[in-house]
Image (cartoon, helix red, strand yellow):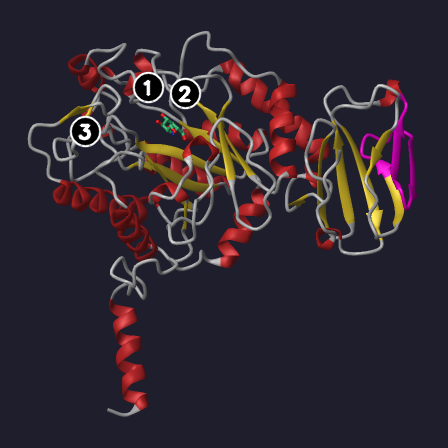
Amino acid sequence: MTRAALLVMFAGLLAVQPVCLWSAESAPGAKPPAANADAMRRWQEMRFGMFIHWGPVSLKGTEIGWSRGKEVPKDEYDQLYTQFNPTRFDADEWVEVAKAAGMKYLVITSKHHDGFCLWDSKLTEYDVMSTPFGRDVLKELSAACKRQGILFSTYYSICDWHHPDYPTDSPGGRTHKAEPNMDRYVAYMKGHLREIVEGYGPLGILWFDGEWEEPWTHRHGLDLYAYVRSLQDGILVNNRVDKGRRGMQGATVSEEFAGDYDTPEQQIGGFNRRRPWETCMTICRQWAWKPDDRLKSLGECVETLVQTVGGDGNLLLNVGPMPDGRIEPRQVERLKELGAWLAKYGEGIYGTRGGPFMPGAWGASTCKGNSIYLFVTRWPDDGALLLPPIQQRIVHSRALSGAKTVVGQSESGIFINVARADRDEIATVIVLTVDAEAPAIPPVKVP
Ligand code: FHN
């Protein structure tokens, strides 16, 4: 067969169905394929997204998945869907809140560990179409995201304590099903993922979770990663698709494990420009809605965002909507305050890289073009901030608030001061213009 004929045949094959050029059968230890570089760069430039944990459990105000068989008896938990009727759910309103907060992407729990599906699945009756509400939440939310220019993504739990074929059960995966069938469960899960991508995509991210339990293996992870990549070119998949995540610190222990980025949880990841990462964190304490839960202050939210982006990470900040379909008004208020802060200082967040001055008790820095953004959250007791020296020359400096700034540079370091009365209560943002590409400046620790 001539070379031309071979190319025609291969092109025809590609056109017919997604072809996996890499699969779990690849040589053991082979590195999974890299993420789509453009999609990764676009996502990293977004820097800030909304995480949403929602389901019938909001009727109880207890934790999604984890309260099944604990605070809420299993039978009662599994019947909550029959009362789930969030008539005040308005997808456009949720997306408007995300935009008002300055968030650029959104990740919602399509199915959490409790197995309930927030979309019209043909593979189970345990879904939102079986509730009194009877509306496809993923359909309405993905459409609202597309209308408003927010990148739509879904969370999907690998462990499923409700499905009879998945081996473990509640509470917390500590009991076992009578007759599990993992192969049949994996086929069910792949069917779900095809429904979600084909029904509500293209997705920005497939945010996997629940990979830590024994029934899930590295081979499953490699296979699922390859499968998702075959469903949609350019989709990003986090490192919880496989077995390489190091606990809540979220880093991937070695390159043989699949997943495009690391996922520190309820903590800010370490400074890392080599491998993309995203901190996921609750705006309250619980992932799902809880009455009178402790709500983070604006200062805590801003400092978390600044320390995360200063470390070259993204922040996925979680809300848990109420059983009537609204995001709790006080959480909306906090998110709007965050958005107002970003409206003033977002040029130092969006499209930036972390550093060159590494995050610390003093604050954090970001950079893009020939600008370095300093977010000073704590000034030394004696007044001025001293940063380590850099080779590049500072040719201009200004505080984004317009306050008068004193900046001096020498071989021993950079001297920065703003009058106490002009310092911002949360973060004083100072822009240093240098005579070079700022992201090329080697990162430096701030003692
Ligand atoms: O068990 C889940 C938890 O409910 C929540 O979904 C978080 C969010 O990343 N992930 C798991 C805990 O690590």
The one nearer the camera, 136 or 219, is 219
Residue holding disc 1: 86
Looking at numbered disc 2 in the image, what kind of residue is underneath it?
Pro
Determine the residue positioned at 14% across, 26% down.
176
Which stretch is magenta?
398-419
Seen at 17% across and 46% down, the residue is 187
Residue 386 screen position, x and y as percent: 85, 33
* Residues marked 1 and 2 touching at CB (< 8 Å): yes
Give the residue at x 56% y 46%.
Answer: 44
Q: Amino acid at mark 3?
A: Thr
| Amino acid carrying mark 1 in the image | Pro
- Callout 3: helix, strand or loop? strand
Instruction: Tell me the residue that label 3 is attached to.
Output: 168
Using the rendered view, name the quadrant where residue 101 is placed.
top right
54 vs 387, left or right, is left
Tell me if 400 is positioned left or right of 184 in this view.
Answer: right
Seen in the picture, residue 39 relative to 289 is either above or below; the reply is: below
